[in-house]
Amino acid sequence: MTTQRIAIWKLLWRMIRYAFGLYLLDTILWLFIAGLPVVPGLIIREFFNTLTSTETSGSAQLISLQSPMVWVALIFAVGAARIVAICAGRVTKTQHRFTMSSLLRRNLLDKLLQRPGAESLTVGRKTVSPGEVISFFRDDAAQVEDTVVGTNEIFSAGVFAIVALIILFNVNARLTLLVFLPLVAIALTLQHAEARIKRYRSASRQATQQVTGLIGELFSAVQAIQVAGAETPILNHLRWLGDQRQQRVVQDQVFTAIIQSSLENLVSLGTGLILLVAAQSGVGGGDLLSETLRERTLSVGDFALFVYYLAFVTDFLWFFGGFLALTKQTEVSLERMGTLISSVEEQESNRVEGLVEPAPLYLPDLKGRMTELPAIAQPKRDTALEELRVENLTYRYPGSDTASQRWSDRGITNISMTLERGSLTVITGRVGSGKTTLLRVLLGLLPKQSGEIYWNGSHIEQPDQFFVPPRSAYTPQVPQLFSNTLQENLLMGFQTNETELRKAIAIAALDHDLAAMPEELNTLIGSKGMRLSGGQQQRAAAARMLLRQPELLVFDDLSSALDLETEQTLWSHLLAITPRSPSSYTPTYLVVSHRPFVLRQADYIIVLKNGVVDAEGKPEDLNIVM
Amino acid sequence: MQIPLKQYTSLLAHYLKPQQGRVVGLAIALLSSIGFQILNPQILGYFIDTAVSGGSQQKLLIAAFLFMGLALLTQILTVTATYLGEMVAWTATNALRLDLAKHCLNLDLSFHKSHTPGELLERVDGDVNLLSRFFSQLVIHVLGNGVLLLGILIILFAENLLAGVSLTLFSLIALSLLLGIQSVAVTPWAAYRQVSADFFGFLGEHLVGREDIRANGAVGYVMRRFYELLQRWLPIYQKARFASTILWSTSVGLFTLGNAIALAVSAYLWNQNAITIGTAYLIFHYTNLLNQPIERIREELEELQQVEASIHRIRELLNVRSQIQDSGNAHLSAGALSVSFQQVWFSYQGIKPGDREQKITLSPSVHTLQNLSLHLPAGQTLGLLGRTGSGKSTIARLLLRLYDVQTGEIRLGNIPIAQTPLSELRQRVGLVTQDVQLFQASVRDNLTFFDARIRDTEILETLNNLELTEWLQSLPNGLDTQLGADSAGLSAGQAQLLAFARVFLKNPGLVILDEASSRLDPITEQCIERAIARLLHNRTGIIIAHRLATIQRVDQILILEQGKVVEYGDRFTLQNDQRSRFSQLLKVNATTLMA
């Protein structure tokens, strides 16, 4: 056993504890569902015993027919009770299932959103695409859900297996002890197979993840694929990945089947053995037995009961064995999810604990009553920016240490700068020189490896927590919008009035476009905002940023999709806010741009080259690029 | 019963035919394991009877060993059936997945604008996953258990006529009842599948937008939308699962009834001295045995509810037709292609929505292009100018037939583009836009779009043409270096250079550059200029630009304004004409930008 092994039982227990009331209720109902079939066993024994006893007494045929009918009526009653339990149990089980997977999904999403926003998601140092991440939310969450909700089913089965065992023990102690033989065999088999179960499962999950990854990318890039006329080769690649997945999953499933059927077989063999021993110890009809011999031999009724209850015990045994195998596979899922939410450095010490943290889910309760969602926390305006100072900021992309020397060129090294209130600082430089990286590291969207950031002289410990509205807002080079209305996309939970909203739209030079939209702010902008043109997307993202009136406005090549006139309109609007406008709002700008007219208006220019500052100064001091 | 058998059979026939052998093997394995299920209790009954009548130890031993032998055999069969079943299921679902992916890839953009990648992923993968048992086991199980049921009933008839008749009646009633209520849960399950597709669509989009979400303080908002989705999801899940429960509780009720009947009948017969105690036990046992096939059929029916919902959704997806007809068979000539537009009118509103949602046009006038005519001889280059939303990019989309014109005609190499096979058209027209989609794959696969036929030497030569050799050498594994999804590890500018390389590799007859260099810095842009010159050599070109610097080399100039041509002509002529819009633009550019 390795040391990093996750404590699966502890994790499952924490998940059970999350909705413990629901779990208990569900368990009780499942005890009934699983346990009620025990009763007919007793009834049937009495039934057969009544029949055989009438044979011995040989009298009063009428009475003897009545008493078996009482047993028949009892069977009805038990059946009805079971139906009620099933209906109620389904409802609680559904609720519990949904709660368990929702908790995992919530924590997974929450942790992923807590990760530095621009850092790519990795598993085992390999980047994973959004399509691949979806398979964690779908398949791995479902796997854990199955296991958690399986625990009370196994518990119920276990309880009745024990009850059955006690009954069996009373019937015949010696025979009952034989039941433990298959149990030992199951334990040995599983221990032997554990490593393989996990290896196969992990391979099959990975293959699945690659397929979902490609399908996700395929539909994200559908226009590029159509334009390139590349449908056939891409589908061929998908076919190949599908074949890989088929191989891995079939391997996994067949191995699981081998384990399961071996367990079943061990149990069957055990049953055969017990029957054999029972036969050898002598089974006789009730009529042949004297009271004193009852201890050693079985009546027909006893025998029927023995067979009936033995099935309980043996079914439980292989059910339990199968469940243990399932938990091995669940371990794989939890490990995978744990790796996904951990950063590269943390991946050694898996952060899987975070997945099972209790957190409110606001689900409707069993009666379907909705829980009101809390209001979205609004940003509080605390400090006005006077001066932002950055010292020796360094960030290297992962892989830099392990890969070749040249690879480590990627990133930024020892960048320092100071931004005064109301100033415009422009970062420029060639493609791949680290401009975007610098913005991201400053805002905490990538974790800095060294360097310090001071806001009005005070040290910022966690840039990613600090650099959010109203302190700062950011528009990336390729902004992402979401399939919703334009208004939702701009607000994203930010509370403001219509005037402010319109104002931001006007500054972003989106007002004319908006007027042309049939449903104005309620226009659905389509998947990833694809119904808007590239330029409209950029300006919508700019409006989203401006709306929040942040102290620090950060944008990366804001106008790359805009024509000259629109671009100039936008810039003149932006710069009109600063710094001498009558409004009290004075933003500070940090932008990446190549445009000469932006560079000319800059208060300070930083030219980057290969991740380091190549030149810097006021525009008049730098006669480059212009 | 309302099970759409015809749909099922055609689906099964289509995807199972190529693997007939396996299906037959699977059927044999499954049916024999069902057969063993009927044999095993026989042995048990024999065992009990022998034991009760005080039969010899030897007979008992034989029975016990037979019982264990069968158990072993059953295991072998189970494993074989699993293997064959999984193979059949995966081969079939993989083929279906590919067909669906292909279908969706060929759908026009208006469809993709209203369906997120995450949603489509769930429909192509998630919905199909549910069909796996349908392809491999469902039918065989239903049939096999039907046969099993029949067998048990026949044996019961042989045991005793009354028992046979009553339990046959019972089975008939039970099965028709279960079939009758089977379809109850199909609609809720279809609703459930849609919410789950919406959920994964939401997830996919917001995972891509993490940077925007974090930096604009919208994490709380995204979590709230997540909770809202959960709130919508759970009641539908409850409804679907509860509808399925009706089937389960009905079968439990029926089984209780069956047991009661069996016991009552055997009590009666025993009372009449018509049967032995062993037979009485057997009747009880067979009723229990009846329960098993009926339960199994019930389980399959429950599964079928979800399968039916999925099949319905898959068919719905397959029924979405692309607005673009691909029926041409005229071939394009090799080399540069001439381009002509004849009185082209186009409006995004004219496009019938590919689905329920209404297509929304965001341009001010109804028509994005109005009466556009132009002629660009083979080998020449056109510079296309105009403000955002003037219709420039639309021209590129029309040339690639991402949309079709409403009136007028577009010719390429003097052949109407609708008459050229779509794949050939898109192979011969190269488009570079400022949005570059990269795959989570090697540099090579990203450049070739996974086309293994393109040789490395070609790729290296192209990269050399683009002066990217140095960049390539800086990668740890050269062409095999894995690029991250969402161009992680590449700057947006570098990604744009790769987009140029992609087009180079296609060797097109017409090259369209739609603001292709807008994310590049001036120095890299100059670098690219040389590459563009090489790319346009002996090719026809259309350069769409916001900025004038990029169109220094063109032969013709066309200026668009709100879908209308405001100026079109030879560049030299326009440049020298003081009153032309173009020469004025050049002047403005020179004074405000270059000064």
Image (spheres, rainbow, N blue to C red):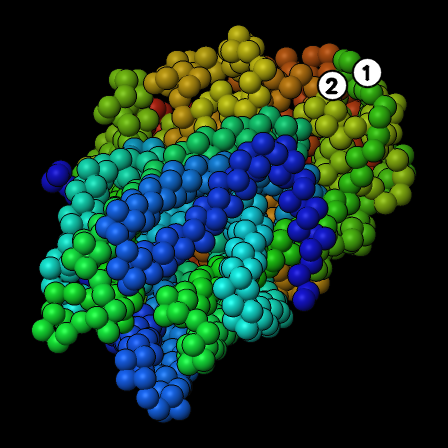
Q: At which x and y percent is residue B33?
A: 45, 46
- Residue drawn at x 38%, y 27% is A433
- Say what amino acid the circle numbered 1 marks: Ser
**Chain assignment, label 2:** B
How packed is label 1: few (under 14 Cα within 10 Å), some, or many (20 or more)? Answer: few
- Residue B536 can be seen, yes or no: yes
- Residue drawn at x 63%, y 39% is B15
Residue under pointer 1 = B333
Residue under pointer 2 = B509
- Quarter of the image for residue A472 reads bottom left
**Chain assignment, label 1:** B
- Say what amino acid the circle numbered 2 marks: Gly
- Residue B383 can be seen, yes or no: no
Asked whether B422 or A465 is in front, the reply is B422
Mark closer to the observer (2, 1): 1
Whether residues under marks 2 and 1 lie with C-beta atoms below 8 angstroms apart, the answer is: yes
In the rendered view, tell whether residue B244 sits above or below residue B376: below
- Residue drawn at x 27%, y 71% is A301
Asked whether B576 or B411 is in front, the reply is B411
- Quarter of the image for residue B183 reads bottom right
